[in-house]
Image (cartoon, helix red, strand yellow):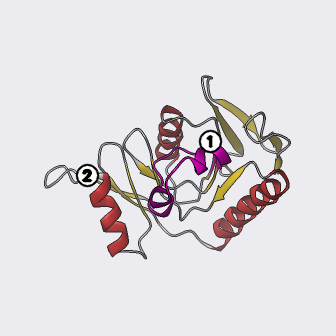
Amino acid sequence: MTTVLNLEPITRLTSEQFYELCLANPDVPMERSPQGDLIIMTPIGGEGGSQEAMLIGRVVLWNEQTALGVVFSSQTVFSLPGGGDRSPDVSWVQLDRWQALSQEEREGFPPICPDFVIELRSRSDRLKLLQDKMQEYLNCGLRLGWLINRQDRQVEIYRAGQAMEVVALPVVLSGEGVLPGFELEVS
């Protein structure tokens, strides 16, 4: 289960402090909310890891054919413009936006919001926390995001400037104008 620690009684965790904390504890997957809360992520099991790897692989294959951007794994933490530090399960950044970052920015926690993300709800994930995370991405510039919720047999589709859409499984998802020509069958 994901654990959220409110550190406000003792400190307000800055992005820089969070970065140093992650470097000092490389085996502990963590995120930081825009409010400075420390979020300790529970490791996922074999089924979740396999599903995540499949999703990353599908986006990588599409990206190799189009060369339109850069794909990232769930180990990548993005320092979002809204103040949070987040690591989506799968993410993609348009190539020109990625190349606009300095080498130092690319090597640390990139100060950019991905153009596309996939969050895969695991058995231990609380849905409300994932929905809030998806909204945070939107507030920071996300163009398209999918929250795959196999427990409830649905996908929530998040688009910039639009209301969230819920579709039932099975479904074929489209990358629309963000990932042109990309399709993902989710069953």
Of mark 2 and mark 1, the one earlier in the sequence is 2
Residue 56 visible in the picture: yes
Q: Position of residue 169 (x, y in %)?
A: 78, 44
Q: Quadrant of residue 62?
A: bottom right
The structure residue drawn at horizontal position 13% and vertical position 55%, both measured from the top left corner, is 10
Residue 177 is left or right of residue 112, and the answer is right
Q: Amino acid at mark 2?
A: Asn
Q: Position of residue 136 (x, y in %)?
A: 47, 38
**Which residues lie in the magenta part?**
93-118
Residue 125 position, x and y percent, is 52, 55
**Left or right placement of residue 145 versus residue 80 in this view:** right
108 is within the stretch colored magenta? yes
Classify mark 2: helix, strand or loop. loop
* Residue under pointer 1: 115
Residue found at x 81% / y 49%: 184
Q: Which residue is rendered at x = 78% and y = 54% of the image? A: 63
Residue 6: which disc?
2
Q: Is 34 rendered above or below residue 139?
A: below
Q: Which mark is residue 74?
A: none
Residue type indicated by callout 1 = Asp
At x 50%, y 46%, the residue is: 112
Q: Quick check: can you spot residue 94? A: no
Q: Nearer the viewer, residue 79 or 41?
A: 79
Judge left or right: residue 120 versus residue 105.
right
Q: Measure the C-alpha gap from mark 2 to mark 1.
A: 29 Å
Check the image and report above or below for 41 versus 7.
below
Which residue occupies the extreme left position in the image?
10
